[in-house]
């Protein structure tokens, strides 16, 4: 699934991307009972490193629409903000962390990605809920730290084995 190989998706690539989107969506729903403990940041980081910016961008777009529709918040400011926030993190990984496979560095990238998502989402949340910045930030800070910590831990523990597995799967599907 090389990112510069062609300008269209094969049926096989579309199936793999669909499966990865389902995994991204389902893990969040399964872990929904735990506040901000999820694999979303880790999976987006993993997908970006293995698939590249454009394919991960397509996954993120479908994921955001699906997540927003499922959670009943399919309104333009929130859904748009969520898409911008996730894509900013994906763009961060695809540019700043593009050439590294160093797990501690990628763990730092996951932490940055988690905080970037949270901080971008402050704007649409403040606008929709009519809350002020400092009270919102004060009430959300613990949850931001939890998201960053769960993103760091999952990246630290899972990146190496799952990136090898995903790359092996992608290579196998290209050959067959």
Image (cartoon, helix red, strand yellow):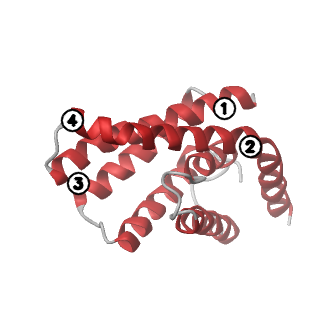
* Residue at mark 1 to residue at mark 2: CA–CA distance: 9 Å
Residue 4 coordinates in the image, percent (x, y): 64, 45
Q: Secondary structure at mark 3?
A: helix
Q: Could you tell me which residue is drawn at 23 percent across and 32 percent down?
A: 134
- Write down the residue under mark 1: 106
Horizontal relation, residue 29 to residue 116: left or right: right
Mark 4 vs mark 3: give the one in front. Answer: 4
Task: Looking at the image, tell me whether mark 3 or mark 1 is earlier in sequence order.
Answer: 3
Label 1, residues with CA under 10 Å away: few <14, some 14-19, many ≥20: many
* Residue at mark 4 to residue at mark 3: CA–CA distance: 17 Å
- Write down the residue under mark 3: 77
Quarter that holds the C terminus: bottom right
Q: Could you tell me which residue is drawn at 53 percent across and 58 percent down?
A: 34
Label 3, residues with CA under 10 Å away: few <14, some 14-19, many ≥20: some
Foreground of the two, 76 or 34? 34
- Write down the residue under mark 2: 159
Q: Is residue 116 above or below residue 30?
A: above
Label 2, residues with CA under 10 Å away: few <14, some 14-19, many ≥20: many
Task: Looking at the image, tell me whether mark 1 or mark 2 is earlier in sequence order.
Answer: 1
Q: Are marks 3 and 1 in contact (CB under 8 Å)?
A: no
- Write down the residue under mark 4: 133
* Residue at mark 4 to residue at mark 2: CA–CA distance: 34 Å
Q: Secondary structure at mark 2?
A: helix
């Amino acid at each position: 699934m090389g990112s510069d190989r062609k300008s269209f998706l094969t049926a096989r690539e579309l199936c793999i991307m669909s499966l990865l989107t389902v995994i991204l969506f389902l893990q969040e729903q399964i872990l929904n009972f735990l506040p901000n403990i999820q694999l979303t940041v880790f999976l987006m980081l993993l997908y970006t490193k293995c698939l590249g910016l454009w394919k991960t961008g397509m996954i993120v777009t479908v994921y955001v629409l699906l997540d927003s529709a499922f959670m009943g918040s399919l309104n333009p400011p929130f859904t748009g903000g969520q898409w911008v926030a996730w894509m900013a993190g994906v763009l961060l990984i695809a540019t700043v962390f593009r050439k590294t496979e160093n797990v501690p560095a990628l763990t730092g990238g996951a932490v940055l990605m988690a905080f970037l998502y949270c901080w971008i989402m402050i704007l649409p949340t403040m606008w929709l809920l009519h809350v002020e910045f400092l009270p919102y930030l004060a009430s959300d800070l613990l949850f931001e730290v939890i998201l960053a910590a769960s993103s760091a831990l999952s990246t630290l523990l899972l990146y190496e084995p799952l990136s090898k597995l995903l790359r092996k799967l992608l290579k196998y599907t290209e050959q067959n």
